[in-house]
Structure formats: structure tokens, C-alpha cells
Amino acid sequence: MKGLSKKLQSAIAVMSLVLSTAVTSQGKPSQIEISSKDALLQVGDPLTLRLVYKYEKPLIRPTTGEIVQSFPHYAHLKVEHSEGRFSMNRFPIFPTDLTVKDSLGLEYDGQFVSLYHRGQKRILFPTPGTYTVTVSGYTRISNPLSITVEPASELQTRALSLLSDPNDYSFLEHGAYEDPNKRSVRISRLRLVVEQCEGTIYAKWAAARLGLEYFEDFHKKHPSFIKFKAKLNKDQVEEPLFDKAHLYLTAGAKLPDEFPIREKVLYQLGRTEVIKDNYEKAFSLLDELGAKYPKGKYGKRASKGKEELQRVKKREEHQ
């Protein structure tokens, strides 16, 4: 939540809870299920988690009689080390939205990535060993997950040392920074992670965040992509912001599909490919968006995006 005060962030959290309560007052979930593709992690790795709420009766909006398509949940992680050396309770899961999974309104799911606990100023899995992870919400407790954590690799350890401030993790995860004057510091830290920790999940994640940041800066400077593209094709402009955006977005697209940030990375990367006249690559990215993130904000735009891109391509071919 970039640039938001703590009071406003708290207000948003409270509003999410109110909205969630309004929906779930129709009936609490009968079951909460969690799963993860990664049962084996390194110290410092984030936890990618799929969360499913199951209901005995469909969730219906009282005002319309229609099935609820999505709602903000209110759930927490509990992480326990098998030897009692570490535990974490009531770790809030963000973002909060769960989306309907079936046509009956009986199942809702979401994909989440959890990494850093700001209150305790530490990562989720700080020591090797076996951990048990559960999720609690609305008086329900999920099935337990067993996660084995191995010592961090040399490059992973290097990445953790470069991210020396809790605000580095906030920027990495959410694009949030505590003070506009500190944005350059956060960016420089993530650039070091990309340059010095190649191949790690942190390097890919940092590249994804940097790509989105540089693309945003580029778009502010060049609101019209059409005009910028025309100048670029005539070698009338050099724009480091665009070059950096394309470079880091390309690297960030190598993140696993489970990372929610990847959806927006693919979308913005596709826009840079259009500007570079790489239409086939842009079509491929839109296909991937639609296939892997059909319920997402940008995945929903994939079909119309392909239609628009086809019109642009034909128009340029006839000029």
C-alpha cells in the first residue's frame, strides 16, 4: 500500500474485515483447506499457499440474489517448529480476496505468498527443521501442512544480508515504502539482489518489483505509448526507464506462477513488447495471462487485449 499512512492502512484492514463479516454472516465456511507445491524450502524462502474456503450453502448477495464472486477473507497463519525453537501465530494473510471457484458458490480460493513478519522483524522460516503450518479463520482451522526447511544456499544468504531493513521486505512484497525519499534506497537494494544473487527466488522477485516500478516511472514520463513507439521506431528517443522496465520485467517473468505479482508483470511486459514491435511475444504473453490467471485483474483483460492488439497490428501493416 504505497505511500499510505499507518492509520489509513489500519482503516482499510478494518473495512476488509467488515466486508468479510457481511458476506460470511450468511454462513461460516464448513472447511478450510491449504496446500503448497513446495514442501521443501530453504531458510529465507517464502511460503506459497493456496487457500480454499468450502461452504455447505452457496454465498448469495442479499441485494441481488446472485452468487458472490469474491470477498475479502480474514485469516491467519500459524507456524510452529517441531522442536519448539520457533513459532509464529496470527500472521495475517494478504491480499485478502478469495474468488469463487465453482458455479454453485460453494468453494472460494486464493493464492498467497507470505515471507516477512514486520511485528517480529523476521522471516517465516528463520532456522532449518520441520515446521507445521495451519490457517485459522472464522473459528475454523485448516488441515496442517508439514514444511521441511534446509539451510540457505550461499546466494540465498547473500540476498538475506542485502535486505537488511524490514522496509526492504515491504517494498519487495508490496511495492510499499515508508517515505518517498527512501524509494531510491529500496530500489538500489533490490538491484543489488538481482545483480549478486542470480538464480535465487529473491533475484527473480526483486526483478519483478523493479520492472513494475520502472514501468510506472516510464508511463508517467510517456503517457502516450503510441507517440513513444513512433519516436522509438524512428530512433528519435532513448529512454533508460523503458530499457530498465523491459529488462527487469523479462527477468521477473521467471517467477513461479504461484506468485501473484507475476500476473501484472506479464501484462506490463506484454505492453513493452508491443512498443518494441514484438507482436508474437505479446500475443504469447496474453495467452499465458488468460490461461494461468483467468480470474485475475489482468488475466480477465487477455481476450480483449488480443483483439485490440490484432487491430493495431493490421492497422500498422496497412500504413
Image (tube, rainbow, N blue to C red):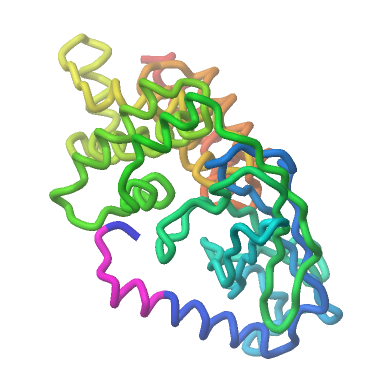
Left/right placement of residue 25 relative to residue 211 reads right
Q: Position of residue 256 (x, y in %)?
A: 61, 35
Quadrant occupied by the C terminus: top left
Whether residue 313 is situated above or below residue 107 in the rendered picture: above
Q: Where is residue 181 in the image (x, y as percent from the top left)?
A: 13, 49
Q: Position of residue 53 (x, y in %)?
A: 75, 69
Q: Position of residue 133 (x, y in %)?
A: 70, 59
The residue most toward the top is 235
Left/right placement of residue 79 relative to residue 225 reads right
Q: Does the magenta stretch include residue 315?
A: no
Quadrant occupied by the N terminus: bottom left
Q: Quadrant of residue 39?
A: top right
Q: Quadrant of residue 307?
A: top right
161 or 194: nearer the viewer: 161
Residue at 53% over, 68% down: 92
Q: Does the magenta stretch include residue 8?
A: yes
194 or 311: nearer the viewer: 194
110 or 75: nearer the viewer: 75
Whether residue 3 is situated above or below residue 223 in the rendered picture: below
Residue 270 visible to the viewer: no
Q: What stretch is highlighted in magenta?
A: 3-12
Whether residue 174 is situated above or below residue 214 in the rendered picture: below
Residue at 29% over, 72% down: 6
